[in-house]
Amino acid sequence: MLPKPYRKSDRKQVVNRKRHQDNAARQPVHVTKGDTVRVVRGDDKGKEGKVLRVYPKTGRVTVEGINIVKKHRRARTAEEQSGIIEMPAPMHASNVMLLDPKSGEPTRVRRRLDEDGTKERISAKSGDAIPRPR
């Protein structure tokens, strides 16, 4: 039988700290906002689009025109209209691949330190550098 803690709040702080560390952990994502990607798995397989947003905590990305869902939206002001809107939903980053700038085919990404010390993304297929989107 375990000894009881002196105060209940002591035990709660330890549990909350651990949960916060797990939630704050970020997953590495191989694409950034503005990249052109192709979907390799799921209902939208084969479609291409631009990355609108990256969620590093969950490892998900939102791609323009991909994974469209319908959302019921209430009017927030008197002038705004309620209704059903269509919007892209986030999907896991492992389901998309970055497009090679040379051939336009999906490729894996390598990293290399540039001459000035900055990290550079390299296409695994062609070996060319993939520029960062502005």
Image (cartoon, helix red, strand yellow):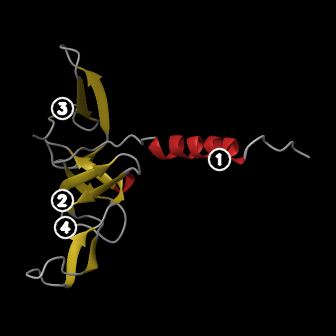
Q: Where is residue 36 in the image (x, y as percent from the top left)?
A: 17, 51
Q: Label 3: which residue?
A: 128
Counting residues from the start of the chain, the first of labels 2 and 4 encountered is: 2
| Image quarter in which the C terminus is found | top left
Q: Which amino acid lies under the numbered mark 4 shown in the image of this protein?
A: Gly
Distance of label 4 from label 1 (alpha carbons): 44 Å
Q: Label 2: which residue?
A: 49
Q: Are marks 1 and 2 in contact (CB under 8 Å)?
A: no
Q: Label 4: which residue?
A: 65
Q: Residue drawn 7% across and 81% down?
A: 79
Distance of label 1 from label 2 (alpha carbons): 45 Å
**Foreground residue among 86 and 98:** 86
Counting residues from the start of the chain, the first of labels 3 and 4 encountered is: 4
Q: Which amino acid lies under the numbered mark 2 shown in the image of this protein?
A: Gly
Distance of label 3 from label 1 (alpha carbons): 52 Å
Q: Residue drawn 26% across and 58% down?
A: 62
Q: Residue furthest front?
A: 7
Q: Label 1: which residue?
A: 12
**Foreground residue among 8 and 113:** 8
Secondary structure of the residue carrying tag 4 is: loop
Secondary structure of the residue carrying tag 2 is: strand
**Circle 3 Cα neighbour tier, 10 Å, few/some/many (<14 / 14–19 / ≥20):** few
Q: Which of marks 4 and 1 is in front?
A: 1
Q: Residue drawn 22% across and 27% down?
A: 120
